[in-house]
Image (cartoon, rainbow, N blue to C red):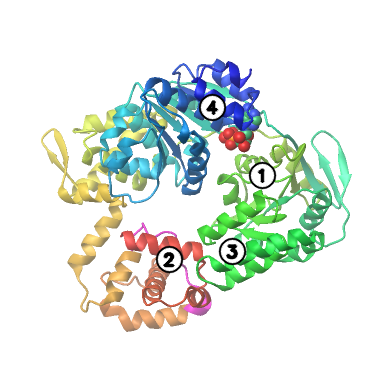
Amino acid sequence: MKVEDVQIPESAKKLLIETGFGELYPPQEEAVKTGALDGKNLVLASPTASGKTLVAEFSALKHVIEKGGKVLYLTPLRALASEKYEEFQKYARLEKKSGERIKIAISTGDYDSADPRLARYDIVICTNEKTDSLLRHRAHWMSDISLVVADEVHLLNDMDRGPTLEVVLARLLQINPDAQLLALSATIRNAEEIAEWLKARSITTEWRPVKLKEGVYLHGEVEFKDGSSYKVEEAYKNPAINMAVRILKQGGQALIFAETRKASVELANKASLVVKNFLSRPEERALKEASSKILETGERTRISKLLAELITRGTAFHHAGLYGPHRKIIEDSFRTGKIKVVVATPTLAAGVNLPARLVVVNSYERFEPGYGRYPIPVLEYKQMAGRAGRPKYDKIGEAILIARTPDEQEYLMESYICAEPERIWSRLAVERVLRSHVLATVASGFAHTEQGLYDFFDKTFYAFQYNPKHIRGIVGRALKFLAEEEMVRLDRERIVATDFGRRVSELYIDPESAVILRDGLYNRAEILTDTSFLHLICHTPDMAPKFYPRRKELKELELYLDEHREELMFPVPDEWTDRIAFEEYVAELKGARVLECWINEMSEDDIIERYAVEPGDLFRFVENANWL
Ligand code: ADP
């Protein structure tokens, strides 16, 4: 099917053809034929870069130009929202029937606002969390939405971000039963089940614009699923570097996934010493520019200096501890081909679109304190592997796992390469998670009785997938907590939010954090100082993850604790009988000290040196504390 034959407004068609779109990709054709442009709900599960966004663009343009509708585009991350916003900008010159140009907005921050300006826009791109907060503020324009696009719907399975997405979708369906819903997802096993929940049709494809070859490396040789193989020259000790060299010689780029941040920095450092030998003069010059950009952006720290140095050698590390704008420079320089090798943590695979000819999955295991080593889910591997192959630049993408023994090679081939990704499961049924959503449901007037609450939660994916009875139990317990903490009041049959409860819901903070803040202020410490308040903030669950101290910091922190005991609003847990709680408390104190240093304008580099926190984490920590 050609773009020319797609039933979208002529002006949009013309623009797309001018931009170079001719033929539809097979998943796009299937989506069109399945009713994406006829207002049908659809779950489209298809690999990265198989053109899902264009289907959403078609539908969005149809809604806005032809029907005068309004589109809400949901993404799980701010960086993805920015990416989509940039992609949609090309449509800003098209006109609606009224003669006005299409207006596109992005909204990702400030969780305490109904953002009334958004009412004037035709296409609004939001993170799931921002949408949740807009729903809590009863943004009136939400009922004008005629199309909801939900990107990366497989994240329903994510412990942290899944529940919000699930509640947002259920809520949007509740207030806008006639809106069309287009859910986009990576290839998953139970797309049909999600579709059934959303009363949608479903399409699952494995189609990719660039062929993907998946293989396992063992002792200098890569063996692929299709039986083919090649030898890798073992010029260096590290297999990932040897494979990267091979692809560099062919003019390609490599993306290596390392297990931890530390491993990503170390491997990038090693790789850079090799990669630098493959750079041309003009490439070196371009890299110098990118490197200076790093140094000119944000504060100079030992991390940014190392990053800048590695970039001059055509290599970078990439993880969530980096300062956001630095990550963007790396991504852009990789996309334009300047940086040749990026060593990233797996968070990259779930985030921005950054394909490379070669993807190496350096380790299929993860380590979690208290849990030990465990193999990653197939879905996570598939997401990393899916980054292999740059459309338009590469004919074939290669994704390679590394084995150390023949036995392991066989295991990796069977359990990852030939395996199907896991089913997606709802993660909603956790009382701590549900409290906030139960409170929001009452505080924003989406339910007025206990039965009303159950009716809403009966419509979630959890209730659909398991048993509504089970979620009712947890909703009931969450409600009891909220009533005991005076966030809701039971008034005969009716449930109403108190002023406190309403404010907590609007501020988008964990109800437990609110209880801690309130109790801390009532408790009062014997002496109130800045430390009292900074520790109070760090004592809340919204300040996660905590900055656990290194061993060498412990002594100093325990001394600090003794000196400031009288200033703290909560009793210090006993070091000997409740070691875990004590360690957590010390970590909170460390957080308070980090905040204090930041407030006193200690340089970022000194904070990094003294507390071993990374810029990206520091940024989020300060942002959270500021909000609280
Ligand atoms: P997904 O959302 O599935 O990850 P994208 O929609 O981002 O994939 O598409 C990946 C790339 O393919 C984009 O650069 C997009 O412009 C391009 N693309 C999409 N559809 C077509 C098409 N029909 N013809 C040519 N290029 C396309």
Which residue corresponds to the image point at 28% horizontal and 31% vertical from the top-left? 454
- In the rendered view of the protein, which quadrant contains the C terminus? bottom left
Is 166 situated above or below 146? below
Q: Are marks 4 and 1 in contact (CB under 8 Å)?
A: no
Stretch of the chain drawn in magenta: 539-553
Q: Distance between the residues labelled 2 and 3?
A: 43 Å
Taking the image as shown, residue 580 lies to the left or right of residue 363, namely left
Q: Position of residue 18 (x, y in %)?
A: 60, 29
Q: Name the residue under label 4.
A: 55
Few, some or many residues within 10 Å of mark 4 (<14, 14–19, 20+): many
Taking the image as shown, residue 410 lies to the left or right of residue 189, namely right
Q: Which numbered mark, 2 or 4, is in the foreground of this view?
A: 4
SS of the residue under disc 1: loop
Q: Which of marks 3 and 1 is nearer the N terminus?
A: 3
- In the rendered view of the protein, which quadrant contains the N terminus? top right
Q: Mark 3 points at which residue?
A: 293
Q: Nearer the viewer, residue 48 or 402?
A: 48
Q: Earlier in the sequence, mark 4 or mark 1?
A: 4
Q: Which mark is residue 355?
A: 1
